[in-house]
C-alpha cells in the first residue's frame, strides 16, 4: 500500500509531465554495481560487505562528478578510488568494464508495467546522471517509454546541480511532477526549484547519500504510485 506524506490525492489533471530519475528508481543500480564490483574485488583478493561497497560508492561518486567529464569517466574514477582505498590497481579493461556493465543492469520488476500505465496519460521524461549512449541500454530494457532524455552529458552537470532541473523546467510541458528514489540527487533540488515530488521509497543498501527531505508524496514502489492516480 502507498504511504503518502499528504492527504491530497494525485489527480491526472494536475500534471502534464512526469519526470523520472532512472538509476535507483527504475533500474536496480545497486544490484548492477555489486554484480560488477564484488567479483572484481574478489579477483584482487579484496573481501568487503555489500553495504560498505555501496556506501563507499555513494561517497565517491559525487566527488568525482564534481570534476566533470562523462559518466564513463566518472565510473572509471570511482573504480580507481576503490583501488586506492583497498590497495589494488584496476586494469584498463576493468575500468572500461564498469560502464559497459550498465548494458546488463535491469529494471525493477514493477518498472515497465508502471511506466506503460503512466505513459497513457502523461509525457514521460528521464532526468538522469548518465551519458546518452549508456542510457539507450536502459531505455530498451524499459521498453522505451520516454519522450525525452535530459542527461548529464547534454546539460554538462550532474544532479543535484540545479541546472539539471532548470533544463527540465525549460523543456518540459508543465505542470511537472518529479519522481525519484534518491532524496539527495533529486527530491531536495527539485523541491528547491518549486517542483512537486514523489519519493519512491525503495529498500536501499546505501548507493545514494542519505539526506532529510520533504517530498510531496511518498510511495513504496512504482506499482503503488502508478495505481494511486484519481
Image: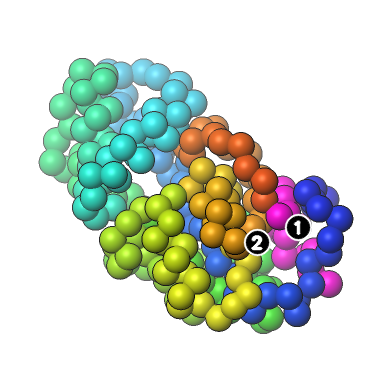
The part of the image, by quadrant, that contains residue 110 is bottom right
The part of the image, by quadrant, that contains residue 76 is top left
| Mark identifier at residue 196 | 2
Q: Which residue is drawn at 13% across and 41% down?
A: 92
Residue 198 sits above or below residue 10 on the image: above
> 216 or 81: nearer the eye?
216
> 200 or 46: nearer the eye?
200
Estimate the spatial distance between the alpha carbons at disc 1 and disc 2, rounded to whole Å: 18 Å
Q: In this view, does 171 lie to the left or right of 74?
A: right
Q: Does the magenta stretch include residue 224?
A: yes
Residue 229 sits above or below residue 128 on the image: below
Q: Is residue 155 left or right of residue 165?
A: left
Q: Give the range drawn in magenta.
A: 216-230
Taking the view exactly as shown, the residue that stands out farthest to the right is 7
Q: Position of residue 105 (x, y in %)?
A: 43, 52
Q: Residue at x 15, y 27 (%)?
A: 89
Label 2 element class: strand
Q: Decide: marks 1, 2 in contact (CB < 8 A)? A: no
**Residue 188 in view here:** yes
Sequence-first disc among 1 and 2: 2
Image quarter in which the C terminus is found: bottom right
How packed is label 2: few (under 14 Cα within 10 Å), some, or many (20 or more)?
some
Q: Which residue is drawn at 23% across and 50% down?
A: 68
Label 1 element class: helix
> 190 or 124: nearer the eye?
190
Identify the residue under disc 1: 224
**Of the two numbered discs 1 and 2 in the rendering, the one whose residue sits closer to the viewer:** 2
Q: Does the magenta stretch include residue 215?
A: no
- Give the number of callouts: 2
Q: Which residue is drawn at 32% across and 65% down?
A: 155
Amino acid at each position: 500500500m502507498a504511504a503518502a506524506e499528504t492527504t491530497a490525492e494525485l489527480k491526472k489533471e494536475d500534471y502534464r509531465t512526469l519526470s523520472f530519475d532512472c538509476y535507483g528508481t527504475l533500474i536496480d543500480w545497486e544490484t548492477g554495481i555489486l554484480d560488477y564490483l564484488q567479483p572484481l574485488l574478489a579477483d584482487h583478493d579484496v573481501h568487503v560487505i555489500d553495504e560498505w561497497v555501496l556506501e563507499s560508492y555513494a561517497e565517491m561518486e559525487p566527488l568525482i562528478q564534481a570534476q566533470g567529464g562523462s559518466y564513463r569517466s566518472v565510473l572509471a574514477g570511482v573504480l580507481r578510488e576503490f583501488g586506492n582505498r583497498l590497495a589494488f590497481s584496476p586494469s584498463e579493461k576493468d575500468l572500461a568494464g564498469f560502464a559497459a556493465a550498465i548494458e546488463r543492469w535491469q529494471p525493477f520488476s514493477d518498472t515497465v508495467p508502471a511506466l506503460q500505465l503512466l505513459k497513457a496519460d502523461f509525457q514521460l521524461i528521464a532526468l538522469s546522471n548518465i551519458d546518452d549512449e549508456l542510457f539507450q541500454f536502459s531505455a530498451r530494457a524499459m521498453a522505451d517509454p520516454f519522450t525525452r532524455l535530459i542527461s548529464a552529458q547534454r546539460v554538462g552537470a550532474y544532479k543535484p546541480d540545479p541546472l539539471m532541473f532548470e533544463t527540465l523546467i525549460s523543456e518540459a510541458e508543465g505542470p511537472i511532477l518529479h519522481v525519484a528514489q534518491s532524496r539527495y540527487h533529486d527530491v531536495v533540488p527539485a523541491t528547491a526549484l518549486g517542483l512537486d515530488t514523489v519519493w519512491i521509497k525503495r529498500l536501499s543498501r546505501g548507493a545514494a547519500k542519505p539526506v532529510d527531505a520533504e517530498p510531496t508524496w511518498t510511495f513504496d514502489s512504482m506499482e503503488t504510485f502508478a495505481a494511486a492516480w484519481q
